[in-house]
Image (cartoon, rainbow, N blue to C red):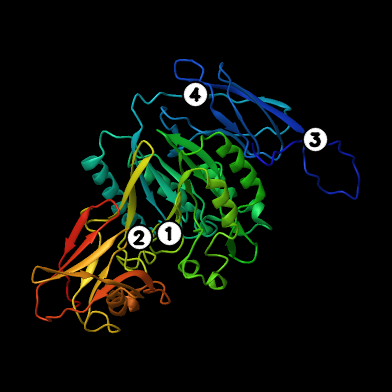
Amino acid sequence: MPACKFFYLVVIFISSVNINAQVDLRNIELSGKVLDSKGSAIPGVAVTDGYNIVTTDNRGEYKLLSNATADFVYISVPPGYIIPVKDNAPHYFQRITDKSGLKQKFNFILEKSGQNEDKHVLIACADPQVGFDEEIPMLGGALKDMELLVNQYYKHLPVHGMICGDIIAEISREPKFLEPIKQMFAKTNIPFFYAAGNHDMDVDGRSNHYSKETFKKALGPAYYSFNRGKVHYIVLDDVFFTARGYSSIGYLDEKQLCWLEQDLALIPEGSTVVVAFHIPTYSPEARKGEYVKEEMNKVLQNRNSLYKMLKPYNALILSGHEHYNENYQLADNLFEHVHAALCGIFWQAPYNSDGTPLGYAVYEFDGNRVKWYYKPIGKDKDYQFDSYLPGADKHKPDAIIANVWNYDPQWKVYWYENGAKMGEMKQYRGWDPGVVDYVEKNRENFRYKYIGAGPTEHLFYAEPIDKNAEIKIEVIDRFDNVYTGIPKKIK
């Protein structure tokens, strides 16, 4: 059972010339029905006001005690029903506009999908971060790539998408880009869900409480859940605005944690749960035990509380924020994917800072099982690494180099000389030669002069015995897919 529950008391207001404002905590009873398009009841649907969660009964009816601080009443779309879309985004909510009525009704109508969703596909990306008119067509190219991929490989499967925050470059400065971006994602015919990022905050408010008003106006609740097949999806808001300039930290407040506790209580233990938000829970520093080096704006501060709540489930965490690609096996049941930015180095280069090309992740679900890969824009889906001949990395001038973007410890990276398998390449922390070279040649044309290459740990090297040998690199992922490539020379 959930450890916390919100209860509301009737508050009697006393007028006073010394009191300018009071919080309205009058009880409001929300009620209604969740029905299919033929008028039949849908029982067991979770309904929430962002505080408490109830489920519909056998007649599809619900009653939810709320109060005037709630902004929405919304549902967790159950499996087997089409994701409702309105105004170019998933629409599973209704805004509570009349805060004076003590009893209000909100009905929801869902349409059956007619598809078996046990096999379905999730396309996940992070940080489109559009801030200028000329970046709109660049985003369009990325979305066209997604459409082509779906039409080629997943045409007959249910497909939905997830954007892990930083939808636009600065929502307070250029909110005008939000609607065009929504329209562009909607035109893919893939229903994309949204998480809020630090660049999606309103920064003119006095506290975190007001920091997602523009986001909520355009996209609805900042945290919610839904279901596809046997998978339960949860989207959270882990960007906590400190009201100090543009500053934020990674943090889940108690209101969300209590809501999450109730949400998970409805999901059977052992189920597959996908949790998406913007700021990662983990870091390369944490992996090395250097926790003191972690920055508060780059990792979720109360991550251990989240890990504990997810312990009964097979859980995937999807995040972004860092403009690099990284994977963490946090526990036997828990894996985090930090997604490279769709915009890369802020649309200034065809790379992220770690050398990962612009792209997105594809997750293929089959019941409770899932496989994944990274899809570079404009490249075949089997393009899973870059490699370089000796001389590309000045720190390892005699070595061949491979950058394996989606690497985790279950992958293997080998090299061959003249057809003979020589062994595994050694992992190291360094800079991708391709992105270093690109930045050096193009920095003067960058909009932001301070951006460039960044270090990564998914690099590998080996020193050939025969410097004139024909070299081949072979990469095997955790799902036993084999990828091969010939190292290239940096010109």
Q: Are marks 3 and 1 in contact (CB under 8 Å)?
A: no
Q: Which residue is mark 3?
A: 9
- Of the residues shown, which amino acid type is indicated by label 2? Asp
Q: Which residue is mark 2?
A: 408
Alpha carbons under labels 2 and 4: distance apart: 43 Å
- Of the residues shown, which amino acid type is indicated by label 1? Tyr
Alpha carbons under labels 2 and 3: distance apart: 50 Å
- Is residue 202 something one can see in this rendering? no
Alpha carbons under labels 1 and 4: distance apart: 39 Å
Does 386 appear above or below 272?
A: below
Q: Which mark is residue 109?
A: 4
- Of the residues shown, which amino acid type is indicated by label 4? Ile
x and y, in percent, of residue 394 in the image: 28, 84
User: Which corner quadrant holds the C terminus?
Assistant: bottom left
User: Which corner quadrant holds the N terminus?
Assistant: top right
Q: Which residue is mark 1?
A: 328
Between discs 4 and 3, the one toward the N terminus = 3
User: Nearer the observer, disc 2 or disc 3?
Assistant: 2
Alpha carbons under labels 4 and 3: distance apart: 31 Å
User: Nearer the observer, disc 1 or disc 4?
Assistant: 1
